[in-house]
Structure formats: structure tokens, C-alpha cells
């Protein structure tokens, strides 16, 4: 009886794992703009946060905080897909 229970639990676990979808994690490589925040003390460098989709979004966030917005050194624009998957219709010859 315990053997059947163990097999049933393993089958259920495998089924649940099969349903899990893999998603792309968002990283600094995904965004084209970075904010450079001021350092805590004099002489210390600031930190860089590269999670902005536009210059305007970065500037809005930096207003009141201070800091600069720069293009991300990590971002590489991804090429569009090679084809859309939609077949072109051919026109009959005249």
C-alpha cells in the first residue's frame, strides 16, 4: 500500500513540474537606460541601477533624489524575429 502511495505522489509531483513555465528573468541587460545614484560619502562612487525603459522614466525617478541617467552599457537591442509566422499570399500572375 505504501508503494502505491509513493508512486502516486511521485506521479503528481512530476505532473506539477511539467506545468511549470520557464520565463525570462528581467535583468539589467533587458533595459536601455541606467541611473547613476550619488555616493553616500565624499569620494565614494555611486551605484548604478539599470532598470529603466526610457530616458523620461529614469529622469522622473531621479527628480528629487539626484543622480544622472545614462544609456546602459549592458543593453543590446534584440533583433526582431526573422519571420512573423504568417505566410504571405502569392498573387496570381497577370
Image (spheres, rainbow, N blue to C red):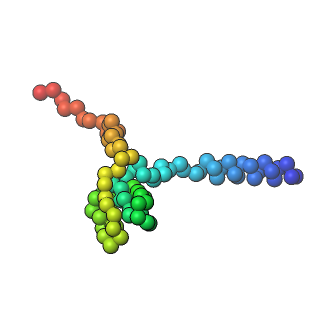
Point 35% across, 70% down: residue: 65
On the image, the x and y values in percent for residue 35 come to 36, 59
**Placement of the C terminus among the 4 image quadrants:** top left
On the image, the x and y values in percent for residue 19 come to 59, 51
**Left or right for 51, reference 7:** left
- Residue placed farthest to the top in the image? 93
Point 86% across, 52% down: residue: 2
Using the rendered view, name the quadrant where residue 87 is placed: top left
Above or below — where is 33 with respect to 81? below
Point 33% across, 40% down: residue: 79
Between 83 and 66, the residue placed more toward the observer is 66
The answer to whether any part of residue 6 appears in the image is: yes
On the image, the x and y values in percent for residue 66 come to 33, 68
Using the rendered view, name the quadrant where residue 39 is placed: bottom left
Between 51 and 70, the residue placed more toward the observer is 70
On the image, the x and y values in percent for residue 20 come to 58, 51
The answer to whether any part of residue 49 appears in the image is: no
Using the rendered view, name the quadrant where residue 84 is placed: top left
- Residue placed farthest to the front in the image? 43
**Left or right for 16, reference 34:** right
Between 49 and 21, the residue placed more toward the observer is 49
Amino acid at each position: 500500500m505504501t508503494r502505491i502511495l509513493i508512486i502516486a505522489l511521485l506521479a503528481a509531483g512530476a505532473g506539477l513540474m511539467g506545468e511549470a513555465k520557464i520565463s525570462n528573468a528581467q535583468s539589467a541587460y533587458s533595459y536601455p537606460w541606467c541611473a547613476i545614484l550619488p555616493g553616500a560619502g565624499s569620494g565614494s562612487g555611486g551605484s548604478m541601477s539599470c532598470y529603466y525603459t526610457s530616458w523620461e522614466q529614469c529622469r522622473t525617478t531621479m527628480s528629487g533624489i539626484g543622480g544622472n541617467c545614462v544609456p546602459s552599457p549592458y543593453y543590446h537591442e534584440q533583433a526582431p524575429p526573422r519571420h512573423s509566422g504568417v505566410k504571405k499570399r502569392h498573387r496570381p500572375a497577370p
